[in-house]
Amino acid sequence: MIDPTGVLSFLLSLSDEWRNPNIIVISPLNDIENEPAHQKIIEEGNDTRWVAERNLRRMTREGWKPVTERDRLGRPSIFMDANKELLLMFRGTEN
């Protein structure tokens, strides 16, 4: 017989992987130029910026979003510096 609690905890652990992003560490910071996700955002004409954790709320209110990359299964990944203090964010150009 299948344990419903075990199945539920397994499904919740899977959903946690889809909600919480993986962290891709970029060191030195100028290595971000080689990442396809960054190149795509630049080609679209968007601005990018490394943002300190203490400024995330303010930047989000101003329209900035984290640069994310999805793997083959659709799980998100974000880009941070080696100390995990800076997050790479982008803002689309105003039309």
Image (cartoon, rainbow, N blue to C red):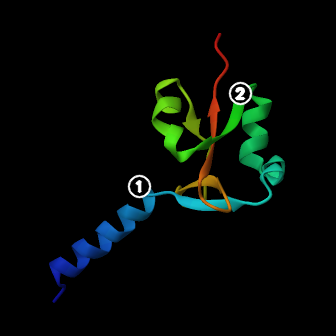
**Percent x, y for residue 22?**
54, 61
The outermost residue toward the top is 95
Instruction: Judge by depth and name the residue closer to the eye, 45 or 28.
Output: 28
Q: Is residue 17 above or below residue 37?
A: below
**Which label is found at residue 46?**
2
Q: Which residue is mark 1?
A: 19
Looking at the image, can residue 39 be seen?
yes
Quarter of the image for residue 27 reads bottom right
* Residue depicted at 80% across the width and 57% down the height: 28
Placement of 22 over or under 61, stated as above or below: below
Which of marks 1 and 2 precedes in the sequence?
Answer: 1
Classify 10 Å Cα crowding around label 2: few (below 14), some (14-19), many (20 and above): some
Image height check: is 19 above or below 90?
below
Q: Amino acid at mark 2?
A: Asn
* Image coords of residue 11 (percent x, y): 31, 69
| Alpha carbons under labels 2 and 1: distance apart | 25 Å
Count how many numbered circles sit on residues in the image: 2
